[in-house]
Image (cartoon, grey):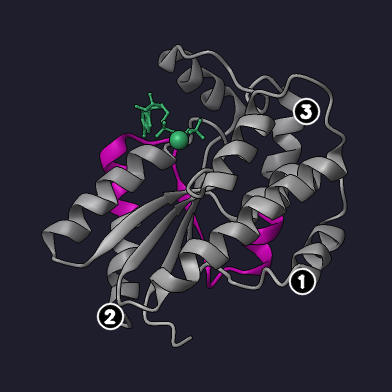
Amino acid sequence: MIKKGLLVSFEGIEGSGKGTQINLLTAVLKENKIPCQVIREPGTTSLGKQIREILLHRQSHICIMSELLLFLAARKQLIEEKLVPELSHRQVIILDRYTDSTLAYQGTALPLELIESLHEKAEIRLKADLTFYLKIDYQLSLKRQKQRNEKQDFFEQKKQDYFNAVLNNYQKIADREPERFKVIEADQDLTSVHQQVLKIWQKYEKNF
Ligand SMILES: Nc1ncnc2c1ncn2[C@@H]1O[C@H](COP(=O)(O)OP(=O)(O)OP(=O)(O)O)[C@@H](O)[C@H]1O
Ligand SMILES: [Mg+2]
């Protein structure tokens, strides 16, 4: 496949503003006539939707390795069924979470090296070209989740120590891959966060 599209992912803990910032960026892309689409993972393919349901509203205990393998199954399916064909066209594909989420979340219980080697063995090699990491702390995450007032899913019910471990893993990725993984200070108002995203995007856009 000749890859003509660009894969842009958004990362961050619950309530960090991924959905909000994706909408704002998409509006700018559309205004500038840059073809784009948003994909949520897991959940875009039929298999992914079923896996998402199992993971977020689980009825019984799922051990951590099974959890990881379910995420990988959804991701593999998404790559084969959707991302590879779509990336053969010139367009921006925006992902609401991708591989870094698996490293950050499942990496709280499993070594990052193990998660990476399973991706490799399953031939899940498609990486995001550019990632916006919306960085907020746990307290702000809780506050924004409460504002939303929806029933909490499995991951949202976890406690402070867990989220701090997730944040720690995101930071490790930021230290390791500063070129791709852009840290955005997301504890500011919507517009300031959007401006930070746009500034990075505008630099990047020149090569697209
Ligand atoms: N910069 C901001 N300042 C204040 N409130 C914000 C900001 N960004 C988002 N919010 C609000 O916080 C809540 C969560 O935002 P959003 O749904 O975009 O986060 P998310 O990262 O997609 O969360 P999740 O991972 O749970 O889907 C929403 O009510 C949104 O309006
Ligand atoms: Mg969201």
Left or right of 200: which side holds 123?
A: right
The type of residue carrying mark 2 is Lys
Say which of marks 1 and 2 sits in front.
1
Say few, some or many: other residues with alpha carbon within 10 Å of mark 1 (under 14 / 14 to 19 / 20 or more). few
Residue visible at 30% across and 47% down in the picture: 194
Queried on whether the Cβ of the residue with tag 2 lies below 8 angstroms from ligand 1, the answer reads no
Does 112 appear above or below 64? below
User: Is there any visible trace of residue 129 in the rendered image?
Assistant: no
Residue that label 2 marks: 206
Q: Earlier in the sequence, mark 1 or mark 2?
A: 1
Cα gap from disc 2 to disc 3, whole angstroms:
41 Å
In this rendered view, identify the residue nearer to me: 95 or 111. Answer: 95
Residue that label 3 marks: 161
- Start and end of the magenta stretch? 170-196
Q: Earlier in the sequence, mark 2 or mark 3?
A: 3
The type of residue carrying mark 1 is Glu
Residue that label 1 marks: 120
Cα gap from disc 1 to disc 3, whole angstroms:
29 Å
| Residue 3 locus on image (x, y percent) | 43, 82
Q: Quadrant of ligand 2?
A: top left
Cα gap from disc 1 to disc 2, whole angstroms:
31 Å
Left or right of 132: which side holds 178?
A: right
| Residue 24 locus on image (x, y percent) | 26, 46
Query: Helix, strand, or loop for circle 1?
Result: helix
